[in-house]
Image (spheres, rainbow, N blue to C red):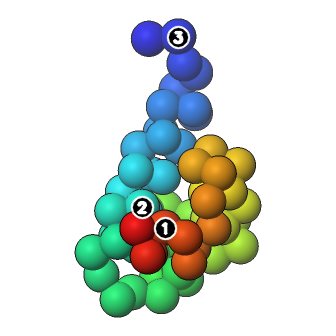
Amino acid sequence: MGKTSVSYVQDLRIEKAVHLLKTSNHSVEQIAGLVGYADGVSLRTLLRRRVGKGIREIRVG
């Protein structure tokens, strides 16, 4: 696959988080917990790094 297991798991978590941001009204903190991150700050940082977009950009679509 060419990815570490950590990278693969992060990709899955990010994919689920993006889906939840687009399809639910959950807060960032709630979504972070649902996908396995300790807090919204960690999720925001990873989204910016991996997807290149912030929460508002993702929610708007």
Spot the residue most to the left.
Answer: 23
Residue 1 location, quadrant = top left
Q: Which residue is mark 3?
A: 2
Relative to residue 5, is residue 26 drawn left or right? left
Residue found at the very far top of the displayed protein: 2
13 lies above or below 37? above
* Whether residue 11 is situated above or below residue 46 in the rendered picture: above
- In the image, which is nearer the foreground, mark 3 or mark 1? 1
Considering the numbered disc 1 on the image, is that residue within a helix, a strand or a loop?
helix
Neighbour tally class for label 3: few under 14, some 14-19, many 20 plus, Cα within 10 Å:
few
Q: Residue flagged by tag 3: what amino acid is it?
A: Gly
> How far separated are the C-alphas under marks 2 and 3?
23 Å
For label 1, the crowd category at 10 Å Cα-Cα, with few meaning under 14, some 14 to 19 and many 20 or more, is some
The answer to whether 50 is drawn above or below residue 26 in the figure is above
Residue 52 visible to an observer of this rendering: yes
Q: Amino acid at mark 2?
A: Val
Is the residue under label 3 in contact with that under label 2 (CB below 8 Å)?
no
Do residues under tags 3 and 1 come within 8 Å of each other at their CB atoms? no
Position in image of residue 44 (x %, y %): 66, 67
Q: Earlier in the sequence, mark 2 or mark 3?
A: 3
Q: Residue at x 43, y 63 (%)?
A: 17
Disc number for residue 18: 2
* Picture coordinates of residue 22, whole percent (x, y): 34, 71
| First reached walking from the N terminus: tag 2 or tag 1 | 2
Tell me, yes or no, whether the two marked residues, 2 and 1, touch with CB atoms within 8 Å.
yes
| x and y, in percent, of residue 61 in the image | 40, 68
Among numbered discs 3 and 1, the one appearing first in the sequence: 3
Residue shown at 57%/33% (left/top)?
A: 6
Marker disc for residue 58: 1
Question: Which element type, helix, strand or loop, lies under badge 2?
Answer: helix
